Amino acid sequence: MKENHLITARLWGLFSMIAGGIFLFFAPGIGSGVADWWVAQSNSMGSFEYIYQGYITVFIVFGAILLVLGVLIWIASLAVSLYGKERLEQEESSEETA
């Protein structure tokens, strides 16, 4: 892979990890706000706690997926980078001996 592709992959991995962390950190607050709004708009078509737990679950699962995806992208790009360096060094050493 080209070096700029690896840098792009690392940046996407970092962005995904940060976004996942933000979703996990703010899940209770976002869930509370959305549940408040939902109950107020729907004339109590469901209890606050039920809606709150549903939204918290959605945000936590989404945040965890983003976090895991970011870590996997980061590790994969690092592995490809290290493998490419080793391969390049092996090619250079084989050219020197030839």
Image (spheres, rainbow, N blue to C red):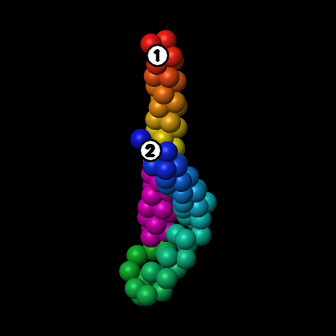
Q: Which residue sits furthest top?
A: 97
**In x, y percent, where is residue 84?**
47, 31
Query: Any mark on residue 80, and which?
Result: none
Q: Which residue is mark 2?
A: 2
Q: Amino acid at mark 2?
A: Lys
Residue at image point 53% right, 53% down:
11
Q: Is residue 78 above or below residue 93?
A: below
Residue 25 appears left or right of 53:
right
**SS label for mark 2:** loop
Residue at image point 55% right, 71% down:
30
Residue 24 appears left or right of 45:
right
In the image, which residues are magenta?
50-66
Q: Nearer the viewer, residue 85 or 62?
A: 85
Q: Which residue is mark 1?
A: 94
Distance of mark 1 from mark 2, alpha carbons?
22 Å
- Residue 5 in view in this figure: yes
Per the picture, the main secondary structure of the magenta-coloured stretch is helix
Q: Is 61 within the magenta?
A: yes
